[in-house]
Each structure stands twice: as structure tokens, then as C-alpha cells.
Image (tube, rainbow, N blue to C red):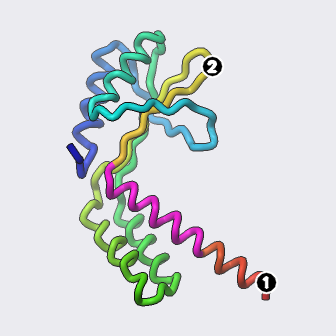
Amino acid sequence: MLLDDLTTIKDDMVAFIAGHGMRSMKAFVPEEVPSVLFEDDDPDGWKDFVEHAKSASVPFITMSEVVLEPEDVATLIGQVRDQNYPDHDMEELEEAQELTRHVGKVGYIQLSFSSGGVLYLYEAATEWYDRFQELLETVTELGQIMLDDNDDE
């Protein structure tokens, strides 16, 4: 089951966490923080993650979500255009423009808890959010290459 919007899952997570007597706190754990990523192919695997947190007697789980904003898509489209892609790379521009269909939707959710000095993470993302991130990374990398080339001159 591929979801286009994780809003319903987020709402279910909030209720499930509360139903287990825990609280959720809005917070995001950046990639730089050492952590253990919970892996489960089951779409309801997040329930197991919450139950592990409950078993570890943690009082709260952190929760973060990313909603695609119009400014995010506009910025990406602008960056793709600014890169002066050759005609054969217009696919990236079309993909960036297609992301406007997902504005207002939740594309990424992160849950985390700390136990025994270890930070545990659960992440869920839609396909369009993963592609959005890939396009951002591509544009950023190309921008850095262009800046480095200009620095050499």
C-alpha cells in the first residue's frame, strides 16, 4: 500500500501513543545525531516501534512531520531553472513542477525515543517526498560544483 499523504497515519500515531499512556513531543532528530534506525517493511511497523518505547518505559516519544509547502516547491523549481539544465535534463524541471500536486500533504514522519543512552528512530516517507529530497540534493550538488568551478577562475 503506497500512500500519497501521511496525515491519517500521523493522526493514528498520536492516538496510539496516547493510548499507550505516553506523550508525544514535537521535535526533529537531525541526521548528525547518532541513532539506531528501526527497520520494518510492515506499513503498521510504527505500532511495534511505539510498543518498544512503551516496553522501555519511556515517558514520551518525539514526533516530527514535514508538510510540503508551496514555497518549498517554488524554491526547488527556481533552483532547477537556475542550474541551466540542458534540454535533455528538463525531466528534473517537470518532476519539480509535478510536486505542486502534493502541496499541503504530509510526506515524511519521524518518531524517536531514547533508552539506555541510545536514540531510536522510526521514519516513514512517501515516494514523492523521497523524490523531492533527491531533487534538492541534486540541485545543491550541482550548485556547489558550479561555485567550485567559478572559484578556480
Q: In which quarter of the image is residue 130?
A: bottom left
Q: Which of marks 2 and 1 is in front?
A: 1
Residue drawn at (39%, 21%) of the image: 23
Where's the N terminus, which quadrant? top left
Q: What residue type is labelled 1?
A: Asp
Which residue bears the numbered disc 1? 152
Q: What stretch is highlighted in magenta?
A: 126-142
Q: Is residue 2 above or below residue 8?
A: below
Residue 128 in the image: above or below residue 41: below
Q: Which amino acid does label 2 sit on?
A: Gly
Residue visible at 45% across and 71% down in the picture: 75
Q: Which of marks 2 and 1 is nearer the N terminus?
A: 2
Q: Identify the residue shown where x is 54% and y is 22%.
A: 114
Q: Is mark 1 on a helix, strand or loop?
A: helix
Identify which residue, 42 or 57, lies in the foreground.
42
Q: Is mark 2 on a helix, strand or loop?
A: loop
Residue 15 placement, left or right of 109: left
Residue 152 located left or right of residue 101: right
Q: Main structural element of the magenta stretch: helix, strand or loop?
A: helix
